[in-house]
Amino acid sequence: MYDSIIPTADTIPVHWLWFQVLLIITFFIHMILMNFLLGGSLLTVWDILTGKLETRASGSIPTLVALTVNFGIPPLLFIQVLYGHLFYSSSVMLAVPWILVIPILILAYYGAYLFVRKSGSAPLFSKVALVFTSLSLLFVAFMLVNNNTLAIRPERWGIYLNNPGGWNLNLGEPTLLPRYLHFVVAALGIGALGRAIAYRYSKMDAGEKEGQIRRNLKLFGWITIIQLAVGTWFFLTMPETVWRTFMGGSLGATALMVAGWLLALLILHSTFTGRFAPAMILGGLEVLVMVIVRDLARSAYLKEIFHPSQLENVNQQSPLYVFLLVFVVGLFALYYMIRLMFNAKTSRS
């Protein structure tokens, strides 16, 4: 049905499952960092508006921008390996706002840097810079949702014929708004958890520290309640063939969906009872489950169109070995740099 408009897929050097597993792992890391960044910056803006700004939980925003962008590259590359003929097509259709993501990310990073550097000498300018950074991150998130939804709906690619200028936002997609809100609300929840983690390992008065941890854990709990409602809305806007996959159509997909709901309930219990360690572990597990569910939903959308198992494997192992080596070395290097950063902050406090 879509053969005439879907480009031919490229070959891959090894079995597609290698790239699928690496996609899930790297995207999980990226999502944790992205949630800390987007959610943390939005919550900091809220603190500014309510006059409750506390710099201990917001001083790492520039570092998070750098880490999030760098860890966003591997999953983006793996998406292009597995679904490149779909992803590149959707990227061309919204070429102008999509390419704007790069300069806006650069400006967002600069705004985060100014927020920290000017907080003492020019507090108003510093706050305006953070608001700009937060709005920029929301724009980037909206473009990502647009591109990802358009890539899995080739039946909507006809919009390009009406407007070949590269401004084809996927605004007619029923899941666009709930999916975007699901994305942002999740970031707020994990962002609150990230702030609790930051306070847990900060050097401050024990009573004040405990109060801030409990405050952010409860915030995580209340946002999780909102997320349950938004997630249900998002789920119901999916095509029937997709949501039925998670309602008994596939045993594995259904089990993961049930696990996600159970984890959400356990998160509510741990956050409202002030249990930091369980909340942190459950929050991480929830993100991992949702990453896998997201991938299964993409497969359900493309069930009659394409699956990575259809890609031709040319059996060239050496590029994979080189990548894995560089990836592991890179992880150790990042760990070492982050450790140095925290040690420097501790020595100054």
Image (tube, grey):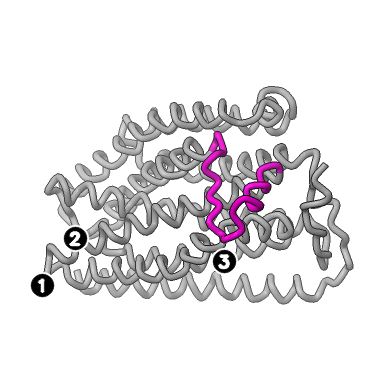
Asked whether, in this view, residue 293 is left or right of residue 249, the answer is: left
Q: Gap in Å between the C-alphas at discs 3 and 1?
A: 35 Å
Secondary structure mostly seen in the magenta stretch: loop
The kind of secondary structure element at disc 2 is helix
Q: Amino acid at mark 1?
A: Ser
User: Residue 192 appears in which quarter of the rendering?
Assistant: top left
Other residues around mark 2 within 10 Å, as few (<14) / some (14–19) / many (≥20): many
Q: Gap in Å between the C-alphas at discs 2 and 1?
A: 12 Å
Mark sitting on residue 73: 3
Q: Gap in Å between the C-alphas at discs 2 and 3?
A: 29 Å
Image location (x, y in percent) of residue 274: 31, 35
Other residues around mark 1 within 10 Å, as few (<14) / some (14–19) / many (≥20): few
Instruction: Work out whether residue 114 can be spotted.
Output: yes
The kind of secondary structure element at disc 3 is helix
Mark sitting on residue 210: none
User: Residue 251 appears in which quarter of the rendering?
Assistant: top right
Mark 2 and mark 1 residues within 8 Å of each other at the beta carbon: no
| Whether residue 320 is situated above or below residue 134 in the rendered picture | below
Q: Earlier in the sequence, mark 2 or mark 1?
A: 1
Other residues around mark 3 within 10 Å, as few (<14) / some (14–19) / many (≥20): some
**Residue to which mark 1 is pinned:** 121
Range drawn in magenta = 155-175
Image location (x, y in percent) of residue 19: 73, 59
**Residue to which mark 2 is pinned:** 127
Instruction: Work out whether residue 75 can be spotted.
Output: no
